[in-house]
Amino acid sequence: MKIKKRKKRGIEAMQQRYGYIFVGHWVFGLIVFFLVPLISSVWYSFSDIQFGGGVVNSDFVGIDNFNQILSKDPNYLNNLRDALGSIFYSLPIIVSLSLILAVVLNQKFVGRTAARAIFFLPVIIASSVIMIHMSGPYVNAPLFTVSSGEEGTYGGLIDFTSILSGLNLPTQINDMLASLLGNIFGLIWSCGVQTILFLAGLQSIQASFYEVSKIEGANKWEEFWFITVPMLRHVMTLVIIYTMIELFTAVDSPVMSQAYTLMQEKQIYDKSSAMLWLYFLIVCAVMCLVLWIYNRYCLKKWD
């Protein structure tokens, strides 16, 4: 005996239709503005793209574009090395600094709301029309100078290279320290969203944990490492993933800048697509490696 399916009527059917209506425009935008360009970029990376008569002509060439950027392009491998190398010092600094700022901003003090807003301002400013007008040479002049040369010192107000030269350190170490110190302002500027995520995680920790630790005689340092950090382990995973994506896809990334220059200024879509897709695969591998190390040596220990 067949059981007839109950037809949805009334309010239930209306809610289902409303659901399809609300999701429909998002699905349409996803297909037209994301999936179609995504598939086209994959095809461009394996093709020779020529423009003629307002028509895009593409001939499949296999992995020739990848061979050219790896063997013939003099800048791609250097840019790839710089982009991947910066993640190994930027990621720990941003995560650590964001956690410290979140712990400080989570304390009760006068003006806490204003302090939180100030630290989140870079996120609002960077995503607004204000940054379009902040394009003058005086506004964009860096606060810290990383290096100086025969043509004269370039940069901002503080020359870390000259300051560190008095320590008589090796040239490579001197340049590395100067670069790290010169990037401090940029790293602090990148901590807004991460600080908010850590703040949300800190507010979800039960106060009873800290009360018990005080009864047991634990100090603030022990509370931080044995309560705060383990309880933020999942939030820290989210922060690490977000920070890596933000760093790898930044406009000032050497690989992204090179690919965008070829694409926008020279209209070379095949090699630029190959650059970005190879970069994407390497980024995915690096992210998987970082998350595996974090899961292996941190998450399992805290769980």
Image (spheres, helix red, strand yellow):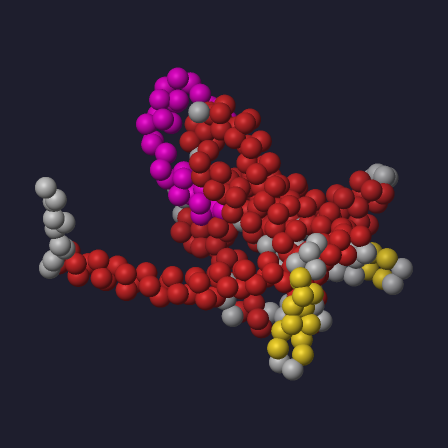
Please give left or right for residue 130 compared with residue 253 in the image: left
Examine the rendering and report whether any part of residue 164 can be seen.
no
Q: Nearer the viewer, residue 123 or 51?
A: 51
Is residue 61 among the parts visible in the rendering? Answer: yes
Q: Is residue 135 above or below residue 106?
A: below
Q: How many marks?
A: 0
Q: Quadrant of the N terminus?
A: top left
Left of 240 or right of it: where is 46? right
Q: Which residues are magenta?
A: 194-222
Q: Looking at the picture, how far across and down is residue 74, in whole percent?
A: 81, 56
Residue 219 part of the magenta-drawn span: yes
68 or 18: which is nearer to us?
68
Name the residue located 16 percent from the left edge and 58 percent from the top edge: 13
**Helix, strand or loop for the magenta stretch, by majority:** helix
Instruction: Determine the residue located farthest toward the bottom in the rendered image.
Output: 53
Report which quarter residue 153 is drawn in. bottom right
Whether residue 164 appears in magenta in the rendering, the answer is no
